[in-house]
Image: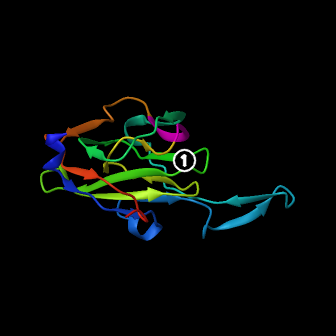
Amino acid sequence: MREMSSAAKLNVQLLTRVAFAPFGDVIETDGADHYPINNGTTERYHDLADVDVGAQSGRSLINIFRGSPVALPVPITMVERHPLGSQAFIPLAPRPFLIVVADAGGSGEPGNLFAFLSVNGQGVNYRRNVWHHPLLALEQSTDFLVIDRGGPGDNLEEHAFQPPRHIIERLPGQL
């Protein structure tokens, strides 16, 4: 734990479309365009994310990831990015999860870190090349529908922080 003491505290903000826009899309029905289909028995919430998987003959993959819960404090020891496609995470139950992203640093390495709390079933779609922390489920194991890219090419880059760059100690609303 001594290594974590040198890490800066990373404040977590609630996930909103405006705050997350530099990194991708918030996937949620609140405020989304929608219209009835199937003779009025279904509401279609249309075009919720810009899925980008076509680079180098890529194709869409639909997966389910099961995230084990993390406990606070959470040290941020690494981030990853996908240079050939976007990656969407949609919880299959309305459980909270943490999202950590970084803006682009000057040399292509991750820059400033930002943390968000997803609530009420919100999902995210990380744009191509956005540095982000792997899945951080909270409270209990959570299944996520994940849409990302399959196909030729290397679509994963990782960057380690030694020691951890930041630590998340509390969530919005906690003292």
Front residue (pair 70, 134) = 70
Relative to 124, 114 lies left or right: left
Residue 82 is inside the magenta segment: no
Most common secondary structure along the magenta stretch:
strand
Q: Nearer the viewer, residue 147 or 57?
A: 147
Which quadrant, please, contains the N terminus?
top left
Quadrant hosting residue 152: top left
Image check: 18 left or right of 79?
Answer: right
Q: How many residues crowd mark 1 within 10 Å: few (<14), some (14–19), many (20+)? A: many
Q: What stretch of residues is rendered in magenta?
A: 140-149
Q: Is residue 12 left or right of residue 144?
A: left
Q: Residue at x 45, y 63 (%)?
A: 15
Residue 10: % across, % down: 27, 58
Q: Position of residue 23 (x, y in %)?
A: 36, 58
Please state which amino acid type lies under the numbered disc 1: Ile
**Dot 1: what SS?**
strand
Residue at x 43% of width, y 70% of height: 18
